[in-house]
Amino acid sequence: MSLLFHIEARAGAARAGKLVTPHGAVETPVFMPVGTLASVKGTSNETLEQLDAQIILANTYHLYLRPGTEQVRKLGGLHRFMSWERALLTDSGGFQVFSLNDLRKVSEEGVSFRSHLDGTSLFLSPESATEAQIALGADIIMAFDECTEYPADADRARRSMEMTLRWAKRSKEHFEKNKHLVPWGSTGNWQPATGNSGATQSLFGIVQGGMHAGLRKESAERTVEIGFDGYAIGGLSVGEPRAATREMIEATLPHLPAERPRYVMGVGYPEEIVEYAALGIDMMDCVLPTRAARHGLLFTGEGRLNIKNAKYADDQGPVDPDCSCAVCGRYTRAYLRHLYSTGEILGQMLNTVHNLAHYLDTMRRVRDAIRCGNLQTFVSGFRSRLQLTP
Amino acid sequence: MSLLFHIEARAGAARAGKLVTPHGAVETPVFMPVGTLASVKGTSNETLEQLDAQIILANTYHLYLRPGTEQVRKLGGLHRFMSWERALLTDSGGFQVFSLNDLRKVSEEGVSFRSHLDGTSLFLSPESATEAQIALGADIIMAFDECTEYPADADRARRSMEMTLRWAKRSKEHFEKNKHLVPWGSTGNWQPATGNSGATQSLFGIVQGGMHAGLRKESAERTVEIGFDGYAIGGLSVGEPRAATREMIEATLPHLPAERPRYVMGVGYPEEIVEYAALGIDMMDCVLPTRAARHGLLFTGEGRLNIKNAKYADDQGPVDPDCSCAVCGRYTRAYLRHLYSTGEILGQMLNTVHNLAHYLDTMRRVRDAIRCGNLQTFVSGFRSRLQLTP
């Protein structure tokens, strides 16, 4: 087993532990910032390290287009290419081509699609998506899945789920045959983590099934039957009500092995990541903190604030008086509002630092609460400060 | 005298020393990064501090429009507003309104112009530009001048120069009457630098005279007669050949008091700032390193490179193997090229760090060479690596 996962504390369904990857340990539950094109937009590796981000995500689809996954392999793999020595995860490209809508065509073999950049015809299959992810060399890679659209009736969701299961098998077969091709070895810049020598990449399966609890259960059971290093719940945050998201997570979790990491893809708001961690989720990712930052939307312990609002022009307080990030320690809302309204790059940079700090700090507090046995108190305090119903 | 200036070493006409401002000492000769809108574009204060930038410049015209100089005063002045505790210099806005061309109308009283943002009619005079600069509260502020256009015949250049001299007097009078209004005192966040207590802002005069050596001499002599804390050479880098720039600097320098700081505004390329420092210039500023960075143009000891060039896609070397900056220590040309060509903000951020490091390091080496008595060797080595004629 390449990916060690130690559960060190529990609080109800929630767990706190460590995921030991070939590029370092990751404390869970973890929120993973998204570095689409081998860069977490608006921030630097140095800042991510200062924020103690232990794992970040990159998008295979985007890197497949630019600079090309074979190009990244040639340059020593993604860790080396972007000079990030900590853990990395890549998605399979499935969700990204799903969001191309009119530009894609799905068949049993895979997905033909047109590049959103220049319309070039391209094709991704379980085999080629896995190959691309081996070339990138992230520590954790994902099986190629079809993200079922929302809404989808039970028939459509079942057909899509069945194909995802067949694709999961093909992804795993291709991975097992080719995982030795990961670029770490040849570049000589990789040293196995202690106690984990001989490690390679790990492959996660993805549970689908639309918004149908029965299908989610079946998808989970049959994905586990195929056997993966960890399990993701995909096809959420695609337009469904938030209650449905939670319901699908709850319908899936009992059917995933407790001793393996469980990952909800593409979520969410701060109150959601807290909620899902409390349900027993170990990993989450979302572009929200970084994308919102670039649009001036800042997260605080007492809710969101839109820094472009004129009322902040005179506000000499920090974004969040309870935040210990470098931005809250140094800059005023008035200055951030000025930077945003004049379009200064620094506005995007500072907003991004704060939002990531808020997310990572929130998860750190969740982990501490699990270990200290006061998760419920933490969650209700967190929600009440946000003025959410309990 | 608010601004202490110690010359500690000389090499030919060049001098190395210290400018002691109310917000800290500045080693000279110095290159000042430009923070137009209270932010050096593409970088953070933290990075500027790591690069050991001791003084930065901000543009009165831009801050006058947004957020407004009175607004900055209300928020405690520019140092506090942007959280920069080191030295600051503001220009007078004269050069900026000069570059508005069709949007401005010059009279003896001052300049009426239209905002480049929304066409609002505005007016700057020696009095109002000085008032704006007192409100901003930079350590060094500039007299309001007319930047003579290029080319300008001797008659036109003389008329313009005479007006700049009258404006210089008015700027000084307004400054002397109102300098106690600097926002430092009331906000309580300013402590006088050791040995410089009771210090206020310092006002520099600006020498004009177009490309006419005789007028430059006369402008220098009559500006010195009015009496300022330091002297700038303005109206250069406005389209004239580089030889003319140098000629005007050489025509002016002998007529400026040796014991006061001398500042060439708006220059230049690395080889120019080295050249002018060797002529005896103490201060320079330019948007070039930061603006070029955002366009992918990088400066190295062996010349410029355009990071968008396809040949860098496979280049695993640093931007400049002789550079000790954080970017050259960590990232490859291939990665920077990828970031640039995908439009990632991080590309602009990293390019900016490198270019500023190159400029600041170049000036550090000039200062060391002056102190070690080997300036000539340094300058010819610097030029020969750039493959410039000696």
Image (cartoon, coloured by chain):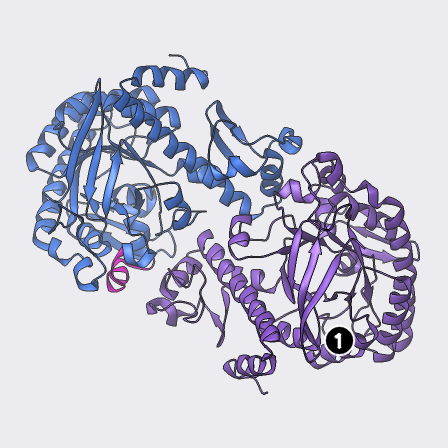
Chain colours: A blue, B purple
Q: Report the quarter where the C terminus of chain B lies.
A: bottom right
The answer to whether A337 is drawn above or below residue B63 in the figure is above
Q: Nearer the viewer, residue A291 or B367?
A: B367
* Rendered image quadrant of residue B234: bottom right
Please, is residue A364 above or below residue B42 in the view?
above
A169 relative to B112 in the view: left or right: left
Q: Where is residue A15 drawn, in percent x and y?
A: 22, 25
Q: Identify the magenta region.
A: A67-78
- Residue B68 locus on image (x, y percent): 73, 41
Whether residue A337 is visible here, answered yes or no, is yes
A121 left or right of A159 in image: right
Q: Which residue is mark 1?
A: B249
In the picture, the quarter occupied by the N terminus of chain B is bottom right
> Looking at the image, which residue is at 51% across and 42% down?
A350
Where in the figure is residue A335, as x and y percent of width and height? 61, 39
Subunit bearing disc 1: B
Position of residue B171 in the picture relative to residue B43 (left or right): right
Residue at left offset 21%, top offset 22%: A10
Magenta highlight on residue A73: yes
Q: Within 10 angstroms of label 1, few (less than 14), some, or many (20 or more) residues?
A: many
**Residue A85, image x, y percentages:** 29, 52
SS under mark 1: helix
A325 inside magenta stretch = no
**Residue under the image location 7 percent in, 53 percent down:** A177
